[in-house]
Amino acid sequence: MSQDIEMHSLRHRRGPRRPVLRTWLMVVVAGLAGALARAEDVRKIKVECPLCEDEFKFKLVLEELRSGLRLDFKQFGSVHSPAEVPECPRCGLVLPDGGRGELSDAELDTLRELIKSDRYKTAREETSYFRLAVIYETLQRPPQDIAFAYVAASWQVDEEPVRCQIYLARALAWYETYLVRPEPTSPARTRAMLMRAEILRRLARFAEAREYLDEIAHHPALARQVDQNIIQQQRDLVAAKDDEPHVAIADDARVDVALRVTTPGSRGLRPQLTTEARLPAFPSGPYAARVSGAVTLQLSVTRSGYVVGWQVQSATAEAFAQSVLRSVRDWTFDPNRLDGAPSPVQVECVVHFGLDG
Ligand SMILES: [Zn+2]
């Protein structure tokens, strides 16, 4: 889902869609989907520079082995992330949109001017995605697309902390430009929120990162378990003042809650959490070690639905218990489901932390 949206936002406005190049973009902007192992397929394809009309070859990665994504959306363990971007060997233009689509005459004129400018000459000392970002800036592409090009540029300089930070700071500025715009929530926007938190952390701006994570933790657009997992993972990293790249907890991590009323005389009651209640996040330690687990606890719930007491009865690991305790104190239950029970209602709660595959 998020892949399609991101692809859409990166797609050229008037350009025709070609399946091969759509796949190229899928590789570039792979979403937070589960880690899927795939065979790698690298092909050389020919593209034409829109400025000097020279044809040249570039490497197109159709599919590759994916072993997960980092918090900054880079494919973990991949040598092709970001995918190679077509760049004209003659004039040095990095082709927008992977060389697909048509550029208007005005856009071509703009690019002709750009590649002669000092700005672009300076950019030639940077990476190809940095140049792509400069091109998107010049063509006034959507800020989130410019931001993502800078993020991809930062992946190209993973081993150079200073350059990496410069690129990330630019990405952050563009994400912030995008996020201050009053727009409805969308997967692109959700991603921008997560990316803003990630970049603040990577730039070691921990206080701002923590404040921003607190702000977005209850955002309705980030209610999905996969997003909640990431928010908690970021909080843990920020608390540890960790500004390194990390593999993201993906949607192969599942958290399920089973609830049962144990108060005598309350048979038949089926307690239910309100939609505002957030399930516990899958903790990053056990996730990295591929360990699943469970926590059983007793909750005291007022008839109006508030949790007023909790006691952990068993937990397969401390990290799971901590995660559950962080979340249960904010839970609220649907009071209609508790009607007729003696207050407070005793609820047995079993939280399962599962991993797919
Ligand atoms: Zn050219």
Image (cartoon, rainbow, N blue to C red):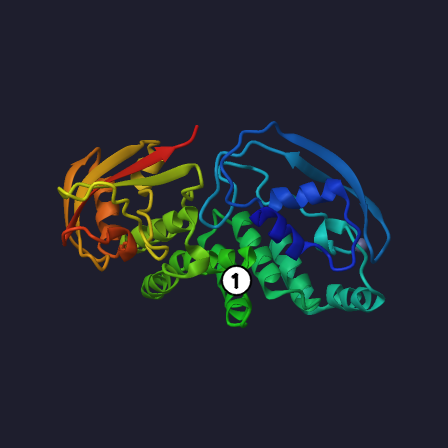
Q: Disc 1 residue type? A: Thr
Q: Position of residue 322 (x, y in %)?
A: 22, 46
The picture places residue 195, in percent across and down from the top left corner, at 47, 57
Q: Is residue 242 visible?
A: no
Q: Residue at x 63, y 65 (%)?
A: 142
The answer, for residue 97, to whether it is visible in the render is yes
Question: Of residues 169 and 334, which is closer to you in this image?
Answer: 334
Q: Residue at left 22%, top 60%?
A: 304
Which residue sits at x=35%, y=31%?
290
Query: What is the secondary structure assignment of the residue under circle 1?
Result: loop
The image quadrant where one finds the C terminus is: top left
Residue at the disc numbered 1: 185
Total labels: the figure holds: 1
Q: Quadrant of residue 330?
A: bottom left
Of 190 and 37, the residue lying toward us: 190
Q: Is residue 58 left or right of residue 123?
A: right
